[in-house]
Structure formats: structure tokens, C-alpha cells
Amino acid sequence: MKKKVLNQLVVMVVILLFAGTAVAASEIMFTWVLPPAGEDIVEYRYQIGGEDPDNWNYVDADPDGVEVEVGPLDRNEPHELYLQQSFDGEIWSESSVGVYEPAN
């Protein structure tokens, strides 16, 4: 039951805002803003470009929302943020994916 609820919550949590800040002419920093977590969510984990079991970054959930800053990244290439959430820090939801597409 919790897994089903967790998967439904992930859909709501994955409203990602891209806020880019220039670092150099071809690089950019991104801030993904995650909305406030539900009462039962205790932790998020995320990574850029895939779902490698050894490359997750962990962030405690916060009832006020969470900002995740990544970069510098190549501003001319597409990037994907993979995000999961957990009720207990051990069992994780399926990934939701936020995508940055460069303007041409």
C-alpha cells in the first residue's frame, strides 16, 4: 500500500523548476525546486544523467520544500535529473525525471 501511495506522491513532487545561473559562457548551474514533502516522506535522492546505484545524492525532506543545486553543466547539452523519494530511507520510489533542453 505504501509503495502505491509513494508512486502517486512522486508524480506530485516532481514539479521541477529550472533556474539557471551562468558560470562560464558554456556552463550553467541549475537549481531544481522540489515542492513541500508530504508528512510521510523522509528523504529524497537524486542524480544527473542516470540511475547508477553508487551515484545518488541524498537530501532530507522538508515540509517547506527543498532546493537542489547541481552544476556546472554544459548549457548546450540536454540534462536529466532523476529523483526518488522514501518513507523510510531504505525503500525508494520509482524515479521521476526532470529534463533541461537547451534553447537553440
Image: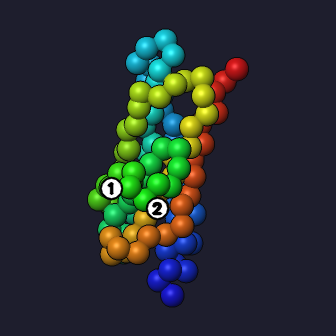
Q: Residue 41, how many percent across, how many down?
A: 37, 70
Q: Is residue 36 above or below residue 75?
A: below
Apparent side of residue 33 relative to residue 103 in the rendered image (left or right)? left
SS of the residue under disc 2: strand
Residue 58 is marked as 1
**Residue 40, above or below 79:** below
Residue labelled with disc 2: 84
Q: Kindly identify the residue that appears in the image at 50 percent across and 80 percent down.
A: 3
Residue 74, position in %: x, y?
Answer: 52, 25
Q: Are marks 1 and 2 in contact (CB under 8 Å)?
A: no
Q: Residue furthest bottom?
A: 1
Q: In the image, residue 93 lies at what x, y percent?
A: 49, 69
Q: Distance from label 1 to label 2 (Cα)?
A: 10 Å
Q: Does 19 appear above or below 87?
A: above
Which residue is located at x 44 percent, y 70 percent?
A: 92
Q: Does 99 sit above or below residue 71?
A: below
Residue 59 in view in this figure: yes
- Work out which quarter of the rendered image holds the C terminus and state it: top right
Residue at image x 54%, y 67%? 94
Classify 10 Å Cα crowding around label 2: few (below 14), some (14-19), many (20 and above).
many
Disc 1 packing (10 Å; few <14; some 14–19; many ≥20): some
Whether residue 89 sits left or right of residue 6 in the image: it is left
Report the residue at 49% width, 12% height from top: 25
**Which is nearer the eye, 17 or 104?**
104
Callout 1: helix, strand or loop? Answer: strand
Q: Pick whichever of labels 1 and 2 is earlier in the sequence.
A: 1
Tell me, yes or no, if residue 39 can be seen here.
no
Q: What amino acid type should be assigned to the residue bearing mark 2?
A: Gln
Q: Position of residue 15 (x, y in %)?
A: 54, 52
